[in-house]
Image (cartoon, rainbow, N blue to C red):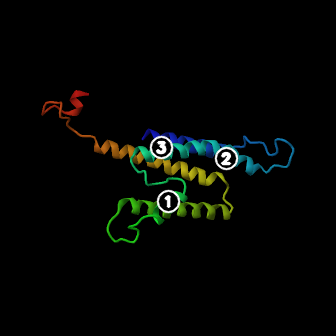
């Protein structure tokens, strides 16, 4: 959960850097486009966020999921000897799902940019989704916590110990 909160914070930082007017229009007088500078200032927090995202997927045991690149997912799916098998294969199904979702996210982002949406809007959407994911993990973790521990005598409630 902490990993997802840190990732959300980095996405919020990237979105804030892209949104705020902190970046000068033309810092060196060379005619540099301000949107290019906004993209460059948002890249470091995004890079750290992607690194943490990959590490989190590995820690959770989903090594077959490349969470931010499609090349390895394509190679893994193409090299799967049971690709067309009708039997349930969790790793293959996750890989195909990740390809579909990453492509879908790319298409949505490209559509927004084509419609004239500013750079920061997709970043704020990503930050919000990641924060919702962190809240969802927190809710699931708290729902799985046992109400009675084995080391407590029966009849003593959790609130009585606290």
| Mark closer to the observer (3, 1) | 1
Q: Residue furthest top?
A: 161
Tell me, for residue 73, which label it has, or none: 1
Image quarter hosting the N terminus: top left
Instruction: Give residue 104's position: percent from left, percent from top.
Output: 53, 64
User: Is residue 134 at all visible to an observer of this figure?
Assistant: no
Instruction: Find residue 18 and name its label.
Output: 2
Crowding around mark 3 (Cα neighbors within 10 Å: few <14, some 14 to 19, many 20+) is some
Give the mark, 3 or 1, whose residue is nearer the N terminus.
3
Q: Residue at x 46, y 64 (%)?
A: 79
Residue 20, given in percent of the width and then of the height, sits at: 68, 43
- Looking at the image, tell me whether mark 1 or mark 2 is earlier in sequence order: 2
Residue 41 horizontal/vertical position (percent) = 68, 43
Residue 159 horizontal side relative to residue 41, left or right: left
Instruction: Tell me which corner region of the image, top left, top right, bottom left or bottom right, holds residue 26.
Output: top right
Residue at the spot 41% in from the left edge and 43% down from the top edge? 59
Residue 140 shown left or right of residue 129 in the figure = left
């Amino acid at each position: 959960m902490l990993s997802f909160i840190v990732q959300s914070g980095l996405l919020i930082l990237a979105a804030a850097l892209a949104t705020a007017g902190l970046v000068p229009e033309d810092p060196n007088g060379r005619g540099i486009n301000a949107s290019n500078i906004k993209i460059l200032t948002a890249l470091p927090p995004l890079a750290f966020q992607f690194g943490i995202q990959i590490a989190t997927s590995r820690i959770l045991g989903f090594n077959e999921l490349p969470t931010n690149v499609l090349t390895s997912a394509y190679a893994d799916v193409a090299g799967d000897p049971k690709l067309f098998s009708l039997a349930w294969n969790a790793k293959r199904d996750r890989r195909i799902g990740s390809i579909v979702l990453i492509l879908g996210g790319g298409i949505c982002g490209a559509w927004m940019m084509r419609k004239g949406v500013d750079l920061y809007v997709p970043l704020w959407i990503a930050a919000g989704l990641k924060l919702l994911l962190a809240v969802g993990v927190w809710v699931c973790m708290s729902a799985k916590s046992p109400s009675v521990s084995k080391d407590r005598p029966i009849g003593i409630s959790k609130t009585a110990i606290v």
